[in-house]
């Protein structure tokens, strides 16, 4: 499934390909977020044209809306949303942790309250696979327990143990998925090295198609995050893809690639776009200062006749985008999203190119 | 400027072309609304791809936001919004009537209060030309007084007289516009035949590049509107384009074309899209029942696997669009807008084709 093409001499970065039922992806890559079956403001054609090779959607959200009956009736998510590339779906473990007001971790699964209507639901390791089977995910994540980054060691240990137990359940029910669907384990352990290594070892013993690092980018510093990657990635199987969940800023991604990570997803480009925060490339390369962010709502842009960027939005001036935000024209959100995803996906392409040239 | 290509034997409908500084347009045509310099949710490329030959924007809104300084700095509206086709701008007369809480009609112009910040402004016949010069409108509308359709004859007479007086001012200041910009007069007179004919005659005597019928679609019945067209259009110069402002439903447009109208604009397709109301073609031709409207938010669509339409949205199911509306994904507004504008613009193309074939 994962093929290593090249390892860097300069860092732990590596170039590879990842084969899925809906196509082969060049690694390292970034997944735009389509939480509820749509990348906010964009059509799937635009997402593809921007260079996205794979998108991420959420088991938790799709389970609540539109629900399994409709997903089944619509023939799965690919067909429903008109995207024939690969889709990875998160298992819901993180959403239960971040969105539900109540959550009860039990031996067989976790109970949560819908953030939409307050109704109670239970996700189990088997259930999330059943949902992801119906969704038709190319890569299904197993159910995990995601603790906060400042939790006590005792709590984090409990999360690791529960995550491993559920990973065993997931393996037991692997047949719920089709043979073409890949299943990834999620390493927990917070900022505790021994727990991280324990979690990883237990998952590796179970043999998953890939390994994700969960429970980062949830409040710790960048330095702490890099610290975890520094010791953890070395221990991850080199013949399997490594996925750092929910990360991150452009620097975070470059630093994580240097530490051997292959896969990323993050709401930053799409969410920040909705707040008028644009990522703008300042110079070639990926050295410090290669980009800046601007707040397009700032009055200083009202008379700006420079293009939004020099690639996919050169026909629109910053003054016009400022006007669209000021007048709450939704086209503004869309153009900002196109800018930010273009920035992220171009950055990933540059990362791959620099690894290939031996520069990263 | 206007060239008559063919007159129907079956009705007063006619086929023609209208030459503007940014291209020649086939008549009859429909103008998508870009009130504040953006067709809601769509890029100008999409608007062009849908078959729009010309768009409409608003002097009133652009004067308030972004304002003249920015419009000037951005090099006019075409450049600012990235649209190189023709643009018609309404003069602001109707917006002062429909949006401003206070409005004071004076001899030299009308005072109004900004619907955004309550600030007071005055539009005069000369001022609206100055604004439209800066906007760079291909077709500039002159300032008019738009009375409600149920106003007393005395009030409507006053509106007609003021509109004529301002039309004279507009002619006096025509040089404010560039020689390439066309200037249209606006016929008022409510539902009073003598006043309509008086208004038209006075404007025709002043020789404008085209004539618009204002003050309809403001509360009267369709029958009353058609009644006005029945006697009024016959008296309009046949060598000039005829523009029915703010109209209307698909039936309204077909009926007005049959009565000799060449130009239309309306918020219906874009506004209704935002409320989930979709215009769906049911059969070929323009006979009664050629379309239906559906409310995509209705629960009956949640399991619907039929495509939204069979032309530009065949890759999306109605169930998916229902899901996007239910989950408030803005992509839904965009797809609905693409559906409705496609419906309207295809209908206009069919209207031209039927006139050409002698069927309308």
Image: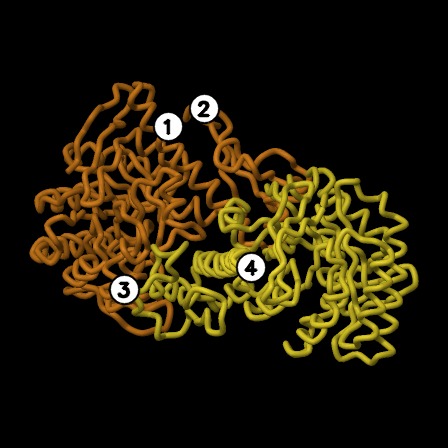
Chain colours: A orange, B yellow
Identify the mark at residue B355; answer none if there is no mark. Answer: 4
Question: Are the residues flagged by discs 1 and 2 in contact, CB closer than 8 Å?
Answer: yes
Which of the pair A185/B24 is nearer the observer?
Answer: B24
Q: Are marks 1 and 2 on the same chain?
A: yes
Question: Are the residues flagged by discs 2 and 3 in contact, CB closer than 8 Å?
Answer: no
Query: Distance of mark 1 from mark 3, alpha carbons?
Result: 36 Å
Query: Distance of mark 4 from mark 2, alpha carbons?
Result: 57 Å
Residue appearing at x 37%, y 54% in the figure: A38
> Which badge, 1 or 3, is on the more N-terminal residue?
3
Secondary element at image label 3: helix
Secondary element at image label 1: helix
- Return the residue at label 1: A350
- Return the residue at label 3: A63
**Which chain is mark 2 on?**
A
- Return the residue at label 2: A284
Q: Nearer the viewer, mark 3 or mark 4?
A: 4
> Which badge, 2 or 3, is on the more N-terminal residue?
3
Q: Are marks 2 and 3 on the same chain?
A: yes
Q: Is residue B272 left or right of residue B298?
A: right
Point out residue A153 in the picture as x, y percentages from the top left corner.
25, 51
**Which chain is mark 4 on?**
B
């Amino acid at each position: 499934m994962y093929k290593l093409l090249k390892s860097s001499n300069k860092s732990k970065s590596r170039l590879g390909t990842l084969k899925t039922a809906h196509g082969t992806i060049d690694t390292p890559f970034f997944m735009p977020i389509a939480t509820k079956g749509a990348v906010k403001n964009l059509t799937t054609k635009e997402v593809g044209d921007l260079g996205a090779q794979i998108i991420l959607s959420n088991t938790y959200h799709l389970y609540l809306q539109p629900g399994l009956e409709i997903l089944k009736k619509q023939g799965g998510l690919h067909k429903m949303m008109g995207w024939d590339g690969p889709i990875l779906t998160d298992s819901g473990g993180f959403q239960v942790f971040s969105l539900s007001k109540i959550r009860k971790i039990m031996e067989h699964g976790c109970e949560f309250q819908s953030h939409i209507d307050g109704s109670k639901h239970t996700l189990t390791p088997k259930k999330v696979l059943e949902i992801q089977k119906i969704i038709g995910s190319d890569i299904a994540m197993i159910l995990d327990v995601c603790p906060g980054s400042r939790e006590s060691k005792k709590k984090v240990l409990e999360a690791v143990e529960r995550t491993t137990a559920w990973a065993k359940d997931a393996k037991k029910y692997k047949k719920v998925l089709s043979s073409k669907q890949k299943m990834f384990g999620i390493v927990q352990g917070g900022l505790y090295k021994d727990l991280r290594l324990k979690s990883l070892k237990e998952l590796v013993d179970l043999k998953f198609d890939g390994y994700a690092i969960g429970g980062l980018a949830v409040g710790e510093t960048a330095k702490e995050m890099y610290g975890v990657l520094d010791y953890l990635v070395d221990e991850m199987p080199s013949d399997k893809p490594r996925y750092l969940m929910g990360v991150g800023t452009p620097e975070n991604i470059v630093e994580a690639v240097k530490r051997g990570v292959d896969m990323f997803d993050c709401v930053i480009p799409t969410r920040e776009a909705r707040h008028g925060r644009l990522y703008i490339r300042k110079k070639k390369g990926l050295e410090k200062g290669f980009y800046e962010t601007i707040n397009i709502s700032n009055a200083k842009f009202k008379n700006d006749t420079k293009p939004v960027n020099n690639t996919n939005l050169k026909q629109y001036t910053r003054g016009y985008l400022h006007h669209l935000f000021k007048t709450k024209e939704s086209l503004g959100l869309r153009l900002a999203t196109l800018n930010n995803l273009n920035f992220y996906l171009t950055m990933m392409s540059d990362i791959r190119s620099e690894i290939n040239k031996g520069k990263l």
